[in-house]
Amino acid sequence: MNKQQIKIAHYGTTINDVVEQTQDNQEKMAPLFEPLRQAIDAGKLADYDQDTYDDTRSVFREGTDVYQKLLTQLQEVAVPARLIGPHRTLIHNYAAFTAACEAMTESLKPDLEVDVAAFNAAEKAQDEAIQKFTKQIQKISAVLQ
């Protein structure tokens, strides 16, 4: 392998790692998100279990921190020249996703208090950003083939 091939291989491995860790993190948080979402939608947040809520806040904080570390990995990876533009878009999309996760985490206040408007806006922003991120991953993967 020449230097360019090594750089491309390292880049591809890093992108795959970020995608896998993002998916793993989402799978860890989803079981806590769904019951909270249902309680908010049903207007039954006051009846929500405090320990479960505290666990949710903690796991969301940890998960958001993981996303921030993954964003840093994306920002620091050596990018093949032909992928600089697509990679910048990828970073932008992942940064938007990470910011939305941070906003959702911040919307969860102590003592079963949720800023519902912020929570809802963050959920929508996460969905939009992760869809754009996924599309960009597909474009980059096609170039790497």
Image (spheres, rainbow, N blue to C red):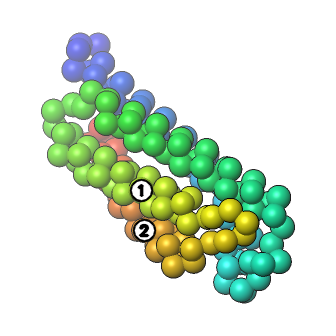
Q: CA distance from mark 2 to mark 1?
A: 9 Å
Q: Looking at the image, which residue is at 50% across and 73% down?
A: 118
Q: Quadrant of residue 125?
A: bottom left
Picture residue at 82% right of the left edge, 58% below the top: 51
Q: Nearer the viewer, residue 121 or 112?
A: 112
Report x, y in % for residue 112: 72, 69
- Residue 120 vs 11, above or below: the answer is below
- The x, y position of residue 78, in whole percent, is 27, 27
The residue carrying pointer 1 sits among few (fewer than 14), some (14 to 19) or many (20 or more) residues within 10 Å by Cα, namely some
Residues at circles 2 and 1 in contact by the CB criterion of under 8 Å: yes
Q: Which residue is mark 1?
A: 99
Q: Quadrant of the C terminus?
A: top left
Is 91 on the left-hand or right-hand side of 83?
Answer: right
Tell us which disc is closer to us: 2 or 1: 1
Tell me, for residue 18, which label it has, or none. Answer: none
- For image coordinates 31% across by 30% down, the residue present is 76
* Quadrant containing the N terminus in the rendered view: top left
**Left/right of residue 123 with respect to residue 4 in the rendered view:** right
Q: Nearer the viewer, residue 62 or 16?
A: 62
| First in residue order: circle 2 vs circle 1 | 1
Amino acid at dot 1: Ala
43 lies above or below 26: below
Please identify the quarter of the rendering in which residue 135 is found. bottom left
125 with respect to 40 (left or right): left
- The residue under the point 71% across, 86% down is 43
Which residue carries the number 2 mark?
125
